[in-house]
Amino acid sequence: MKYFDEEKENLKCPCGCGASLNQDTKDKLDKARELYGKPVYVEQGATCKDYSVNKVGRKSTSTHIDNGDGAKAVDIKKKTFNNKSDYFHFLSCIIQAGFTGIGQGSHWIGAGGDYRLHIDTKLSSSGDMRSWTYGVK
């Protein structure tokens, strides 16, 4: 990867099993970083099923899970964005880079204090982009 060190930047499973992102997701993350023009900080990339389900509490169908063909998801840290303008610029960059799933924390849409941003390369069952919001009550 051009802009990320997989071993140091939370892209591989923290349990040490070797679970990693698939090449397509890595390429798209590099492209998004290039378009953004600023550092991008990763909270979590790939995980194994055991870590994702038992340690994090995700569903067994999470796009973070590497089932042998590489994971398709990355969670981006809040410190990537200095303000909402940066955040919305980054959204444009991830769409241009080809990400198809966007999960936004409620803070970014003005509806709460959740700062999460999940991006992935999974399409909906109808072949469309997907989006959702965390923390909206």
Image (tube, rainbow, N blue to C red):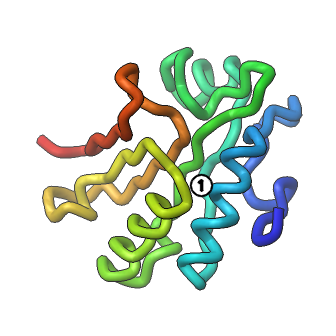
Report the quarter where the C terminus lies. top left
Residue name at image x 46 percent, y 48 percent: 118
Q: Residue furthest front?
A: 127
In the image, taking residue 36 as reference, residue 69 lies left or right, namely: right
Direction from residue 96 to residue 48 in the image, left or right: right
Which residue is depicted at the point 45% across and 44% down? 100
Foreground residue, 120 or 75?
A: 120
Spot occupied by residue 122 in the image (x, y as percentages of width and height)? 51, 33
Q: Which residue is drawn at 62% across and 26% down?
A: 52
Above or below, 18 relative to 4: above
| Quarter occupied by the N terminus | bottom right
- Residue 84, horizontal then vertical, whole percent: 30, 77
| Closer to us: 109 or 25 | 25
Badge 1 amino acid: Glu
Mark 1 crowd level (few <14, some 14–19, many ≥20, 10 Å Cα): some
Secondary structure at badge 1 equals strand
Q: Name the residue under label 1.
A: 43
Q: Using the image as rendered, state which of residue 92 and residue 112 is in the foreground.
A: 92
- Image location of residue 88, percent across then percent down: 33, 72
Specify the quadrant of the image occupied by residue 8: bottom right
133 w.r.t. 4: above or below: above
Residue 21 occupies which quadrant of the picture?
Answer: top right
State the residue at coordinates (56%, 30%): 63
Query: Where residue 13 sits in the image (x, y, percent)?
Result: 76, 38
Counting the numbered discs, the total is 1
